[in-house]
Amino acid sequence: MHDVLQDIANQYQQPTVKLPTEEELSQNRVGTLQTALQLAVECRHLDMIQSLLSEGADAGKQDSGEDEETPFSWAAQNGREAIVKLLLETGKVDVDSKDSSSRTPLSWAAQNGHEAIVKLLLETGKVDVHSKDSSSRTPLSWAAQNGHEAIVKLLLETGKADVDSKDSSSRTPLSWAAQNGHEAIVRLLLETGKVDVDSKDWSDQTPLSWAAQNGHEAIVKLLLETGKVEVNSKDLWDQTPLLWATRNKNGDIVKLLLDHGANIVT
């Protein structure tokens, strides 16, 4: 087994990996199988993964490190679709396991834009679509922030995602999408009819405020057209969307806001 581990480590180009001695192997076979499985997953060694699983390695067992991550979760996080399929076929993985940050495989796949893996996880029917991590972020929140439109669609189509869920900073998926300029995702969220268009985060900034501040004209226009935003809303620093747009020299946005009743003097 030691030679097998060394071979995997070499393929993975990890010369600093601390491998167990032959004596340690004989005393801790289960732990060694887990070490080998983690390495095999990380270097995409499918044949070795199958062999280790047949030997009793557990793809759903958390590692002993700070992350408390399972080989299955690592594969989902890093876009290893073939490995995710292989591990799912065993029927022995907890598809909704949480690591030390309360992140699930779905949460990681959604954040990192791995659409095929998100589909696989949703098709199991065993994942909590609305699972919250230690920052109260949901898979939808992560996907919206990072602009993964196809994944946002998948999550919304389940009918189980809370589209207006707030994280620990009181940010909603709409707030994140508006800040980062993801127009298509803003449209998707608005079309649900279930979002508070004028929700405020910890700093009292609204989606309109974030979009105006960051120069996302198309999103500012979408939000204004809802007729549900307070155009003169002030944040924690007494800044209005107009003041943010003016400060950042976004002239077209300034005009839009003025056309919709923004006050020059507040």
Image (tube, rainbow, N blue to C red):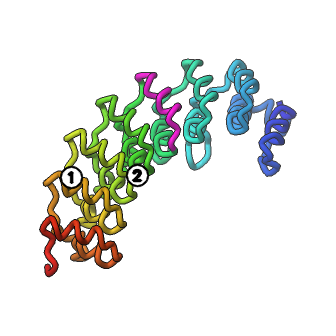
The residue at 43%/38% (across/down) is 151
Quadrant of residue 234 within the rendered picture: bottom left
- To which residue does mark 2 refer? 145
Mark 2: amino acid: Gln
Q: Position of residue 192 (x, y in %)?
A: 24, 39
Q: CA distance from mark 1 to mark 2?
A: 16 Å
Q: Position of residue 191 (x, y in %)?
A: 24, 40
Instruction: Evaluate whether residue 31 shows in this view.
Output: no
- Residue 115 magenta: yes
Q: Which residues are magenta?
A: 113-125
Helix, strand or loop for disc 1: loop
The residue at 31%/36% (across/down) is 161
Q: Local crowd at mark 1 within 10 Å, few (<14), some, or many (≥20)?
A: many
Above or below: residue 47 compared with residue 251: above
- To which residue does mark 1 refer? 197
The residue at 17%/51% (across/down) is 226
